[in-house]
Image: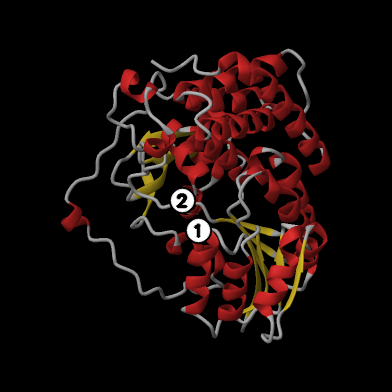
Amino acid sequence: MTRSITILGATGSIGRSTSGVIQAHREEFRVEAVVGGRNATALAKIAQDLGAKFAALADEGAGEALSLALSGSGIRGGAGHAAVLEAVDRDADIVLAAISGTAGLAPTHAALKPGRRIALANKESLVCAGGVFMADARRLGVQVMPVDSEHNALDHALAAGSDRDVEKAVITASGGPFRTWTKERIARADAREASAHPVWSMGSKINIDSSTLMNKGLELIEAHHLFDLEPERLDVLVHPEAIVHGLVQWSDGAVTAGLALPDMKVPIANALRNQNRLKMDLPRLDLAAIGRLSFEQPDEGRFPCLSLAKAALRTGGAMPTILNAANEIAVEAFIADAIGFYDISELVERVCSTFFGRNIAAPSTVADALRIDQEARQAARQLLPTLTGTARL
């Protein structure tokens, strides 16, 4: 049976990989709508390639360009917040949620409709508002399927037993571009070096989060909400080969792991599948050819962002929301060459400390999460001038 799908974040790396999966299985899917940020030409091409009925850009100023790019295709287009929500509201069995950043939180939450499946690739839905997001998903009978390779691997592994028998659920990290660098050399790194991820091809913000290991901290917060596991039952291992994406240690000593070559089409295909897996024409994992899989503990002295994220998870309340907001401001400043590499963690720590004694409750609504996010961003911007260049050698 053909299933209808809407893609939020269609022009990003996850969206493009999703397009590849759909095009390999046109008999399985009908594309209802596609949503992008501001690139009218790219979105129009994707919409036409996939035969979408509706295309929307978040940037209201790009509406005329989108109309021109879609001219003669028969595909309706729109731009701005209302157009994005129209795309979300259209009938679809599956919504692939891959709008990056906090901008994706409201549309992804709005996509929660009875009987739907959300293929989730927007971290902020869980990092900033995980409690309310998952509660609403359960209340509405929405199936949330993780698209991140690590959470997708854990989803596979956890199916091997009962939650009560899980001793530890572990996600892996490649270690980023600075895995073997000294702290002194890391401190001199610029945004170009931090964006050079050794395994995955992602956007600059995510690549830099990988270089600080903040991405692994955010993924621990996501795993907490996705799988209802306490912080003490979650951990990170550095695994440079990026073959084992997640593993579960059971109470009897057994370990179940999810392995795959590092290609996002693998977890996307799993998140979109029905009862049967989608056949994908991808290279197969050849362990004999790889020969060696290595693991090491993350060095939280060289990568303090991981420690900060773990502390935010343990603290709970609004602290993960605050952590994420401060990190986004810090990474923006680093990309702009306004601060050094270790100023990222310094700013995040100072912002979190500013809010720590206030014991702000976890967001009860998406609007609440966005309000806390904005308050934390304002605090980060105010602190930025006091940190500029402080962590450069």
- Quarter holding the C terminus? top left
Front in this rendered view, residue 158 or 4: 4
Tell me how the rendering is colored. secondary structure
**313 relative to 65, above or below:** above
> Which residue is depicted at the point 49% across and 53% down?
152
Examine the rendering and report whether any part of residue 273 can be seen. Answer: yes
Vertical arrangement, residue 139 with respect to residue 294, above or below: below
Q: Amino acid at mark 1?
A: Ser
Which residue has dot 1 on it?
A: 13
- The reply to whether callout 1 and callout 2 are in contact (CB within 8 Å) is yes
Question: Residue at 60% of width from left, 35% of height from top?
Answer: 328
- Look at 36% across and 55% down and name the residue there: 262
At horizontal 66% and vertical 32% (from top left) the residue drawn is: 325
> What crowding class fits label 2: few (fewer than 14 Cα within 10 Å), some (14-19), or many (20 or more)?
some
Q: CA distance from mark 1 to mark 2?
A: 6 Å
Quadrant (top left/top right/bottom left/bottom right) for the N terminus? bottom right
Element marked by disc 1: helix
Question: Which percent across, then down, holds residue 258?
Answer: 39, 52
The disc placed on residue 202 is 2
Q: Is residue 287 left or right of residue 158?
A: left
- N-terminal of the pair, mark 1 or mark 2, is 1
Q: Using residue 263 as the reference point, say whether residue 106 is left or right of it.
A: right
State the residue in front, 382 or 10: 382
> Which labelled disc corresponds to residue 62?
none
- The spot of residue 348 in percent (x, y) is 59, 23
Q: Amino acid at mark 2?
A: Met
SS of the residue at dot 2? loop
Count of numbered circles on the image: 2
Residue 14, horizontal then vertical, whole percent: 52, 59
Pointer 1 local density, CA inside 10 Å: few below 14, some 14–19, many at least 20: some
